[in-house]
Image (cartoon, helix red, strand yellow):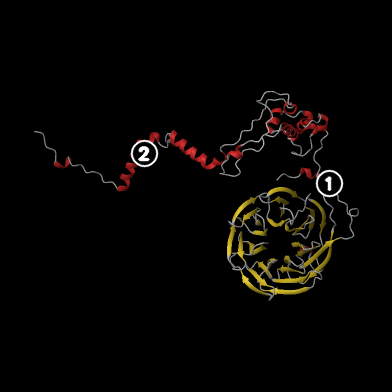
Amino acid sequence: GASVPPKWCFFQDVQKHSVHTLVFRSLKRTHDMFVSDHAKPIALDDHSHKVKMSSKLKADYGAVLHMPVLKEGKDRPIHGGLHGHQTSTESEYLVTGTHAYPSGPGVALTAETKLHRMPSEAGVHSMALTLPPSQARLDAGRTAASVGDIHRHAGIAERSQPPMSSLVHMEAGGTKTSALVRKAPTMPKPAWHPPWKLFRVISGHLGWVRSIAVEPGNQWFVTGSADRTIKIWDLASGKLKLSLTGHISTVRGVAVSSRSPYLFSCGEDKQVKCWDLEYNKVIRHYHGHLSAVYGLDLHPTIDVLVTCSRDATARVWDIRSKANVHTLSGHTNTVATVKCQAAEPQIITGSHDSTIRLWDLVAGKTRATLTNHKKSVRAVVLHPRQYTFASGSADNIKQWTFPDGNFIQNLSGHNAIINTLAVNSDGVLVSGADNGTIHMWDWRTGYNFQRIHAAVQPGSLDSESGIFACMFDHSESRLITAEADKTIKVYREDDTATEESHPVNWKPEILKRKRF
């Protein structure tokens, strides 16, 4: 008979695997099973999509879902609406009265506000005559510029003439010739400002003079210096009244409160001090900056102090309680200058990261960041009367509007590192630079009417010529500058100058002004 195989042939050893391998195999099998429709999106369910979209619409656009429709007839002849000999109701010139817009988001329209009050016929006609043509009508009548047009407008700055300006004239009843005579817009002529002249040189500091502040009563002013002292000078005579010691490094910023008898100072020793001028002693310290403090400003209407530092932050302090109310972070490099105002945005900072930030004081957050400068922004100044400000950098001085920081114009020509800016209510903007030059500008037109480079004080090197800070006193008849030759120079307007002796040399090639 056949031999019986031994018993062990039927019991083959099952190979043992680690749990890791088994799990991995299981995963692989699952993967192989589902690999055909892997990562395919799930089919869209129409009903749920509709529900989602309708709720989104309601949440986001509820207030403006039902807007009035303004019908624009594009296919009528240009004069049809004006002469009224057109009968088709489809393309009549439609001027509605008060649009039925809700007065605010989420406000429902009542029966009273839903009404469209139509103006009278005569009103419509006069309105149509004075209205500029609608964009739709311009587009309908637009043709490419002829070669003649291109030649005629050659050399005129872009955007100096609105498109289709000749059409505007024809619609308003003018003739074609009147449209051709239109000139490019002329730049406004700058206001005449008397030149400024050096009137007094005050020496006494033993180091660079880095900062200035004039007290609200206009009797004296304060300077902070690299010799670690703060000196108080009589404004009328220029005599030293008082020296305050306490900082252990350069004093980079000083400010005198108009609300209390306090003087605030900050320096490269990271300290921010509050001096009581009745006792001439430090009564408060504001601790928190991690590096040198480069500037400070007081809020005009509430008791807070704002300082800016090399630690890339600005800090808002409650003067009385010394609390660090906000740390305004967002700049990526030294914050070189800070300014406060009562209106929004209440804080403006300029930084070595070449941006300017407008801050919301209540939230402690950035409202807007202005990135137009290419170099460090060391100086910012607010116009005393207008709702505008200027910033100075090595590439340009730029003017801006509040509250959003819309760009107005460049003031080009001061090719140096601009350390400081000052402006008075007559519209004289002063820029002081690291190489000792001062430029005087007309604020409105950006005309540079004077350049000053004062000699350094005897015994100084020529390289010690530099302007660190400048400020108008409160009468705005004196300009005080803090300089690298350890002096304080005071300038005043030249009384003898007239428009004839110092004429405005105005060459408006500024139409080529840079658009950024």
Taking depth in this image into account, of 256 and 310 the one nearest to the observer is: 256
Residue 273 visible at all: yes
Give me the residue at 64% from left, 38% from top: 99
Question: Label 1 belongs to which residue?
Answer: 507
Q: Earlier in the sequence, mark 1 or mark 2?
A: 2
Query: At numbered mark 1, what does the secondary structure look like: helix, strand or loop?
Result: loop
Estimate the x, y position of residue 353 in percent, counting from the top left.
Answer: 64, 54
Question: Residue 332: horizontal and vertical position, in percent?
Answer: 60, 55
Q: Quadrant of residue 392?
A: bottom right
Q: Amino acid at mark 2?
A: His
Tell me the amino acid under the disc marked 1.
Answer: Lys
Assign the C terminus to one quadrant of the image.
top right
Compared to 387, does 231 lie above or below?
below
- What label sits on residue 206 in the rendered view? none
The percent coordinates of residue 510 (x first, y second) are 79, 45
Q: Which residue is mark 2?
A: 31
Callout 2: SS: helix
Comparing 431 with 27, the one in front is 431
Figure quadrant of the N terminus: top left
Q: Which mark lies nearer to you, 1 or 2?
A: 1
